[in-house]
Image (cartoon, rainbow, N blue to C red):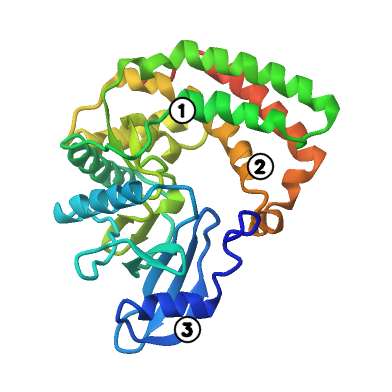
Amino acid sequence: MSRDAPYSKLSPETVLDAIEALAFRCDGRVLALNSYENRVYQIGIEDGEPVVAKFYRPERWSDAAIREEHAFAGELAAQEIPVVAPLLRAGESMHVHQGFRYAVFPRRGGRWPELGNSDEREWVGRFLGRIHAVGRAGRFKDRAFLSIEDLGRNARDFVLDGDWMPDYLATKYAEVTDELLDAVEARALDWGGARLGRILGDCHRGNILWTDLGPHFVDLDDCLTGPAIQDLWMLLSGGPQEMRTELRDLLNGYEQFLPFDRREIALIEPLRALRMIHYSAWLARRWHDPAFPMAFPWFAEPRYWEQHHRALQDQLAAVLEPPLEL
């Protein structure tokens, strides 16, 4: 399996063979879904509803970490929390075919939520409160911890060690990320004493699908141990007043099932800063995968780095401001 093109041998025929190896009868339809970190396909089944297969990026997770993801999804589903858990075959959720580790899920449709009113935000908040309550009832042994070092310093150093930006920006990038990470570490050291638990980790609107029955959560690929606010802040949008209103609604639902430590609100802008730094490093680390230059061609352009530098400057100001108050 080539590191430079980790999915080069994952042909449609290989995908179908992998699904049929689990005793599904495929009808030949393979639809690639929107995913870059892994490869995800909808597979037509002759005698039933289509299934969704996720082929894990080679060398990213250990087998034990993948199984913990699946076990967490299973715990949540057992509590009738609407997450999409993998299907079991002979009691196993993780399978291997031609060197690719993969899992099969039931297809669950829906649309990305707008979260445009209080009822929708409270609905999502209730489910997040339930998810975190289950999360605190156990612990991960093989999944990651949310880490300032990994998301911040290591990500920033990876970018600086590569030839990603024009020389005239490299020094400016180093300076602003130094200041920003110093500010993040001062304000988010040990996550402000927040209680840590098993969380989704990447709870943005793209990982929630909405139907007439309400929301359901998909893709627990980034589940880890961290503070509760990590699963809330990415659902907020707009300026301070809009975020304040949206967070109140989320917490109105959340606290029907679990208390929320208001001190965690101070972590919102530090977490946003870490995500911004990590995102550029993620693109850089994946640039050897041919799908990334095709999907993100602007990453190699000076204009991206100029805009990124300005955004980091703005985020430094946001981190230094007093935190949002409810």
Q: In front: 124, or 223?
A: 223
Left or right of 132 on screen, residue 32 = right
Amino acid beneath label 1: Gln
| Secondary-structure class at tag 3 | strand
Q: Which mark is residue 284?
A: 2
In this orientation, does residue 146 appear?
yes
For the image, the number of numbered tags is: 3
Which secondary structure, mark 1? helix
**CB under 8 Å between discs 2 and 3:** no
Indicate the position of residue 256 as horizontal and vertical percent values.
17, 36
Give residue 93's position: percent from left, percent from top: 28, 62
Label 1 crowd bin: few (<14), some (14–19), many (20+), radius 10 Å: few
- Residue 143 sits in quarter: top left
- The residue type indicated by label 2 comes to Ala
* Vertical order, 202 against 149 (above or below): below
Foreground label between 2 and 3: 2
**Residue at the spot x=35%, y=30% of the render?**
229
Q: Measure the alpha-carbon separation of dots 2 and 3.
A: 33 Å
Q: Please state the horizontal and vertical placement of residue 58, each as a whole percent of the image.
A: 50, 55
Q: Earlier in the sequence, mark 2 or mark 3?
A: 3
Identify the image quadrant of residue 152: top right
In the picture, the disc for residue 29 is 3
Residue 175 drawn at (x, y percent):
70, 16
Q: Is residue 85 left or right of residue 10?
A: left
In the picture, measured across the screen, residue 5 lies left or right of residue 26, that is right
Q: Can residue 239 be seen at all in this image of the molecule?
A: no
Q: Which mark is residue 241?
A: 1
Vertical order, 99 against 321 (above or below) = below
Quadrant including the N terminus: bottom right
